[in-house]
Amino acid sequence: MRIQTLKYELELQHPFSISRETHTTQDTLIVCLSHNGKTGYGESTSNPYYQITVESMQAEIAAVQNQIEAYDFDHPEHFHSFLEKLGLQHFTLCAMDLAAHDLYGKLLNKPLYEIWGTDASKYPITNYTIGIDTIPKMVEKLKEKPWPVYKIKLGTADDVAIVRELRKHTQSVFRIDANCAWTAEETIKNAPLLKDLGVEFLEQPLKADDWEGMQKVKEECQLPVIADESCIVESDVEKCGVYFDGINIKLTKCGGLTPALRMIKKARELEMKVMVGCMTESTVGISAIAQLLPQLDFVDMDGPLLLKADIAQGVQILADGKLTFPELPGSGVELL
């Protein structure tokens, strides 16, 4: 095999704010994995919350590149186990694993969803995310992008007022992501008000390790609650099953499609809802997420919609939130 790593700085259409940070660009790593005349592409974004940079991921790969290129590639799951033994952390593993799955599908000349035995004609529609801003700016962003489902980032002193104002301008479904900014008491208090405003569920309202608070929320909250920061890797799924109604899987955090498939299976065994979210990836990462869609209840894959310019072609998100799957096999990705 041959490996190439590329760094891109993705420029956002608008400054993007959540409860703990604001950014106008997103650095991302693209891994190109070539074998037998085919090339697979994978992606993993940098993340200050987890202290991940593109340079740190590139350094990890460079340190073991000779061993990886000497590997006799046969199946993505076997390759993932090999990479874990080399000590790659999850963000780096994700980029490598996505590239391996894309390569595998291209070698077999089949899209991944077909290899997994799923039907891509039925899938959840992605939400479009409205980041924290002034209320007029949030309303402006909503009007700029009419969409059937919105994820609204909260974590301010006026959270319910924000949703109340946004509701005046659309009848679309709302999902709320507080990114760990609320207490259990705030969550329980806000839930009935938000439910009346057409909110479908709450995502990670409490700090990731506030299990005592989540127990109260589980008992008293009038809306379903989905785990995000509390559910990073496979071993987190079972614990989250006690406190949450569902999980949001991030490929970058868990290490790629290989562990994500196992997390989906475990969540189903626990009768939990399953969502997959994005980290403002380009179409490279989003096309990999799209392959999982037939297995999901919800999805947040609006990364390319938030960018000024994309770096790849693959799955296309249409104006109504639906998708066009590429004819190219694997994840269907080609760099522009």
Image (spheres, rainbow, N blue to C red):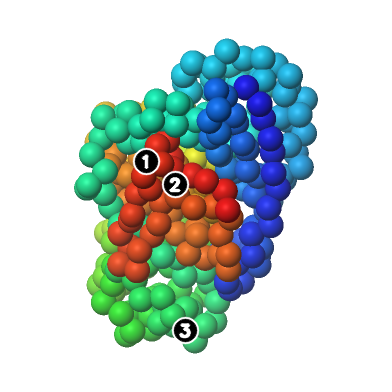
Residue at (45% x, 26% y) in the render: 107
Q: Is residue 214 visible?
A: no
Q: Which residue is mark 2?
A: 287
**Mark 1–mark 3 CB contact (< 8 Å):** no
Q: Which numbered marker is on residue 291?
A: 1
Give the amino acid type for the residue marked by disc 1 in the picture.
Answer: Gln
Frontmost residue, 103 versus 17:
103
127 lies above or below 57:
below
Q: Which residue is mark 3?
A: 140
Separation of marks 1 and 3 at Cα, in angstroms: 32 Å
- In primary-sequence order, the first of circles 2 and 3 is 3
Look at discs 1 and 3 and give the one toward the viewer: 1
Residue at (33% x, 84% y) in the render: 169
Secondary element type, mark 1: loop
Give the amino acid type for the residue marked by disc 3 in the picture.
Answer: Glu
**Mark 1–mark 2 CB contact (< 8 Å):** yes
Frontmost residue, 273 versus 302:
302
Frontmost residue, 109 versus 273:
109
Separation of marks 2 and 3 at Cα, in angstroms: 28 Å
Give the amino acid type for the residue marked by disc 2 in the picture.
Answer: Ser
Residue 28 shown left or right of residue 287 in the figure: right
